[in-house]
Amino acid sequence: QSVLTQPPSASGTPGQRVTISCSGSSSNIGSDAVNWYQQFPGTAPKLLIYGNHQRPSGVPARFSGSKSGTSASLAISGLQSEDEAVYYCAAWDDSLNGPVFGGGTQLTVL
Amino acid sequence: EEQLVESGGGLVKPGGSLRLSCEVSGFPFSYYSMHWVRQTPGKGLEWVSLITSGSRNTYYAVSLRGRFTISRDDAKNSLSLQMNSLSADDTAVYYCVRDQGDPSRSFDLWGQGTMVTVSS
C-alpha cells in the first residue's frame, strides 16, 4: 500500500477539466511540498509539477497543482488525448527521511 | 543533452547480489544529490536511496534493512547501487534519478531504468 492515497482512475472528455487528488498525513504533505509526475507506458516518469504548484520549463500551463493541509490536487484543464497517462503524487516524509509516492492515477481521455 | 543511463540489471537468484550503475552526462554531476527509485507493477513507485553531493550523506528506505549501498564517483560521473541478499520483493525496474535541489526535493531527470528480476 502506498503512503499517499490517490484514486486509481480518472477520466474526462477532450476540453474538460479533470482533477486528481492526493491524500497524505502531517509527516509528508502536511509538512512538505508536493510533486507530481506523469508516466506513459514503457517510459520513465517525468516531473510535471514541483513545490506544490510550480511547472518545469516545457510543461503546459493547463497543468496546475495545489495543496491544502494534508491533501493536494493536480488539475488538468483543456484535456487532450495526449494527456492519457498515469499520474503520481510525491512528497518528502519527515518520519521516513525519504520521499513517498501515491499509488498512481490512470487518466483516460474518453 | 542531460542524460542518465542505467546498467547492470538482470536475472539473479534469491540471496544473490547485483550492482547497478548509472552513467551521467550533460550536467555537473558533482553538484547534485542523486537517488535510486524502483517501480513494480504491484507496488508502484518506491524510493530506494539518496546520496548527497560530495557523498556527505546517504539515506535508505527502511524496508531495505541495510542490504543496499549507494555510492558515487564524481570523477567518473557515475552512480552505483550495490544490492545484496536479494529477494523476489526486490524485483523491479530501478531508476537513477536526479534531485533538482529545490526544497520539495523533486526528481527532474530520470534514466530509462534497468530491470532487476530475482527468481530461482
Image: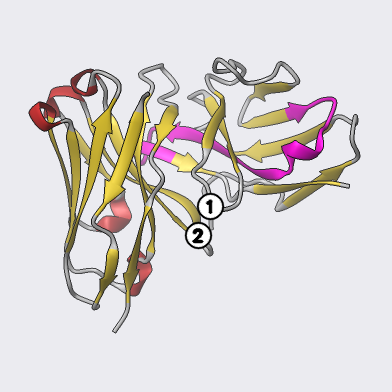
Residue B68 in picture, x, y percent from top left: 19, 54
Task: Label 2: state its secondary structure.
Answer: loop
Q: Can I make out residue A27 in this image?
A: no
Residue B109 pos. (x, y %): 41, 30
Residue at 8% x, 27% y: name it: B75
Q: Quadrant of residue B111?
A: top left
Magenta stretch?
A75-99
Q: Residue at x 27, y 57 (%)?
A: B64
Q: Which residue type does callout 2 highlight?
A: Lys
The image shows a total of numbered marks equal to 2
Which residue is found at the position 24% from the left and 77% from the top? B14
Rendering quarter of residue B26: top left
Would you identify the image quadrant in which residue B27 lies? Answer: top left
In x, y percent, where is residue B21? 21, 47
Which secondary structure lies at badge 1?
A: loop
Residue farthest along the bottom direction in this orientation: B120
Instruction: Identify the residue under disc 2.
Output: B43
* Marks 1, 2: nearer the viewer: 2
Q: Are marks 1 and 2 in contact (CB under 8 Å)?
A: yes
Q: CA distance from mark 1 to mark 2?
A: 7 Å
Residue topped by disc 1 = A2
Q: Which mark is residue B70?
A: none
Left of B84 or right of it: where is B1? right
Crowding at dot 2, Cα within 10 Å, few <14 / some 14-19 / many 20+, comes out as some
A76 inside magenta stretch: yes
